[in-house]
């Protein structure tokens, strides 16, 4: 299975903002952005003016890194978003939020999306009572996502569940932390998603 092996803190520094790829570390002073906010490399501190294409590319790379998706898969998701009715950019973000690894992360089954993806891959998550180990599986409104009995006993999962209780869960998800399960109530509205993402730049990039 192809995966991105670049250091996660380096990815955040490259995009110039926190992408929350390292779980709880991102909320502490040890976060790389707090110590070195400039881009990595010997030329990282230069303030070069970016072209329109560079801005569009950086936005696409940022979203890819946030959700942990490689280029070919991201293109397929964009093609599906473009095919559906409605606003392409909003469809794209909704499809990304519907991925099982992302839903597991939102419910606190992992401290980060990569950790939640690992829980899914190791048969630790069920959807409507059926075990699903495909991170890209699209969860539909009304689906019940739950941890398996074995996954609920893992220390890292327990720590992630405690952390998400403190931070809270999105409005489009209901969570029963004691039972280790939640319901994907509805597709998120654009106002519920991060305002730091400018999906129109991604649409412009792929529309060329």
Image (cartoon, rainbow, N blue to C red):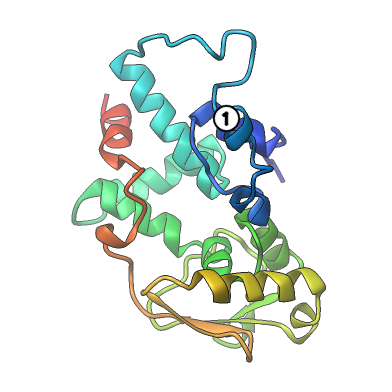
Q: Which residue is mark 1?
A: 13
Using the rendered image of the protein, determine whether residue 34 is visible from the camera's viewpoint: yes
Mark 1 Cα within 10 Å, few/some/many (few <14, many 20+)? many
Towards the viewer: 11 or 101: 11
Query: Which residue occupies 65% across, 62% down?
Result: 111
Which quadrant would residue 24 be assigned to in this image? bottom right
Compared across the picture, whether 172 is left or right of 24 comes to left
Q: Position of residue 199 (x, y in %)?
A: 31, 41
Picture mark count: 1
Compared across the picture, whether 87 is left or right of 32 comes to left
Which quadrant would residue 39 be assigned to in this image? top right
Query: Which residue occupies 52% across, 67% down?
Result: 106
Q: Tell me if residue 144 comes above or below residue 13 in the rendering.
A: below
Q: Tell me if residue 46 comes above or below residue 81 in the rendering.
A: above
Compared across the picture, whether 48 is left or right of 91 comes to right
Query: Which residue occupies 54% across, 40% down?
Result: 65
């Amino acid at each position: 299975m192809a995966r991105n092996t670049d250091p996660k803190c380096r990815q955040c520094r490259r995009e110039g903002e926190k992408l929350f790829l390292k779980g709880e570390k991102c909320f502490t002073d040890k976060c790389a952005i707090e110590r070195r906010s400039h881009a990595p490399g010997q030329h990282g501190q230069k303030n070069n003016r970016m072209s329109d294409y560079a801005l569009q590319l950086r936005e696409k790379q940022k979203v890819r890194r946030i959700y942990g998706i490689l280029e070919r898969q991201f293109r397929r998701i964009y093609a599906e978003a473009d095919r559906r009715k409605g606003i392409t950019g909003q469809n794209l973000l909704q499809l990304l939020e519907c991925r099982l690894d992302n839903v597991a992360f939102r419910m606190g089954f992992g401290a980060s999306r990569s950790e939640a993806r690992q829980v899914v891959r190791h048969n630790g998550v069920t959807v409507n009572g059926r075990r699903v180990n495909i991170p890209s599986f699209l969860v539909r409104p009304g689906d019940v996502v739950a941890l398996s009995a074995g996954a609920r006993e893992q220390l890292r999962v327990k720590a992630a569940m405690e952390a998400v209780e403190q931070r809270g869960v999105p409005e489009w998800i209901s969570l029963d932390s004691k039972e280790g399960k939640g319901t994907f109530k509805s597709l998120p509205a654009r106002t519920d998603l991060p305002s730091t993402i400018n999906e129109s730049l991604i649409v412009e990039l792929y529309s060329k």
